[in-house]
Image (cartoon, rainbow, N blue to C red):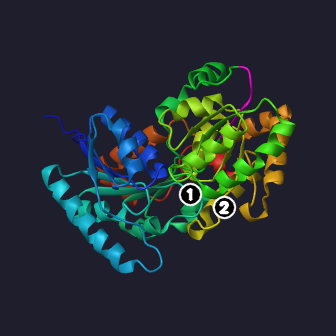
Amino acid sequence: MNDSPAMPSLPNTAAIACGGTGGHLFPGLAVGRELLRRGCAVTLLVSCKEIDRQAAAAAGEMKVARLPAVGLSRGNAPGFLWHFWQSYKMSRMCFLKRPPQLVLAMGGFTAAPPVLAAKRFGARTFLHESNSIPGRANRWLAPRVDGAFVYFAGAGDRLRARRIEVTGMPVRAELLQLTPAAAARTALGLKADAPVLLVMGGSQGAHKINELMTASLPHLFQAVPHLQFVHLTGQRDLEMVRAAYAARQCPAVVRAFLGEMALALAAADVAVSRAGASSLAEFAACRLPALLIPLPTAADNHQYYNALAFAHSGAARALEQDALSPELLAQEIAALLGDAARQAAMRQALSLWHFPDAAAQIADRMLHWSAHSQSLQDPVVPGPDARKLGVLNV
């Protein structure tokens, strides 16, 4: 008789709540693909926003369910609660057809209802916190889930989860093997041998950055006359920004949203961007030096602290929006574009923020912790790459 203990079976159904912004959706997609490779059937739970509809087209074999959740803001508490309840009910209906054994919440307003619904089916639940200051949804969920994963090591101190591991930030697989810069520029319709500035404000654009950039063009072209642009505006400012570049006959690719983001990142020499964690992780993966302009109204000012952590490590330059003028922004861009040594130092620092196996590590931990439920009671142990971020806590 074989007295050896039976090997625990691995879970084979999973759900990932990752909608609302590209910063939640793209990392969730990356983890979903890793779970697919490990034999799991995966359901993505996203919002009804257009950005989710466009990006979820890349879900492949993953099932996609849309929830009517909305964010909580001042004055909309009744609407938030109603949409929360509707999202909870829709999550339960979805799970009745295919009960998940694992659920991962990526933060944001779509995160909580699926986790609460999945717990009714006995699922193991997890969250990923991408920012240096955890969001409200994840702070509320942390004591209720079985484990948490973080990008910034210091974020773990602000979450009351039973187990926390520093895994880094998952990024899109196509960013791990980039097209050469010259080929990427050609693919975008730009000159292969002229410098490129990438301007972006997150998946939904940034009105203030759009205004600053268009106003800075006269000053910028005096300093860098051959500069080319890839500018992602969001839908609101698309025509305004296009008209500004056209008026100066600037070589520019101007889009509301770009599906071929890997081409834009590969083509660029320098970026001007908000400081959302997903964007920062993509800059790190591509070793792209950036001037970061944190969104001043971000919840808990988390973009400021994200940018501060990158700036303190030498991986980026942080600029305060309220102190910026078009002239000053043009000076900052020109100075960074003209300083090869500074760019090289930034690229070296960015390597510390890149975790190429983050999605795979999260998928493996979820499966392992769920199959070996006793390990969920073990002491909190940082992930193997936590040492990289030990000096970067904020």
**Is residue 195 found inside the magenta-colored segment of the image?**
yes
- The answer to whether residue 364 is seen in the rendering is no
Residue 27 is tagged as none
Residue under the image location 47 percent in, 59 percent down: 379
Q: Is residue 334 left or right of residue 113?
A: right
Quarter of the picture holding the C terminus:
bottom right
Q: Residue furthest front?
A: 247
Residue under the image location 30 percent in, 69 percent down: 83
Q: Is residue 369 left or right of residue 220?
A: left
Q: Is residue 332 above or below residue 301?
A: above
Residue 305 is tagged as 2
Q: Position of residue 266 (x, y in %)?
A: 62, 29
**Is residue 258 found inside the magenta-colored segment of the image?**
no
Whether pointer 2 and pointer 1 mark residues with C-beta atoms closer than 8 Å, the reply is yes
- Residue 68 sits in which quadrant? bottom left
Secondary structure category for the residue under label 1 = loop
Residue corresponding to mark 1: 131
Total marks in image: 2
Quarter of the picture holding the N terminus:
top left
Q: Position of residue 377 (x, y in %)?
A: 38, 60
Which amino acid type is marked by label 1? Asn
Secondary structure category for the residue under label 2 = helix
Pick the front one: 244 or 60: 244
| Residue numbers of the magenta segment | 193-198
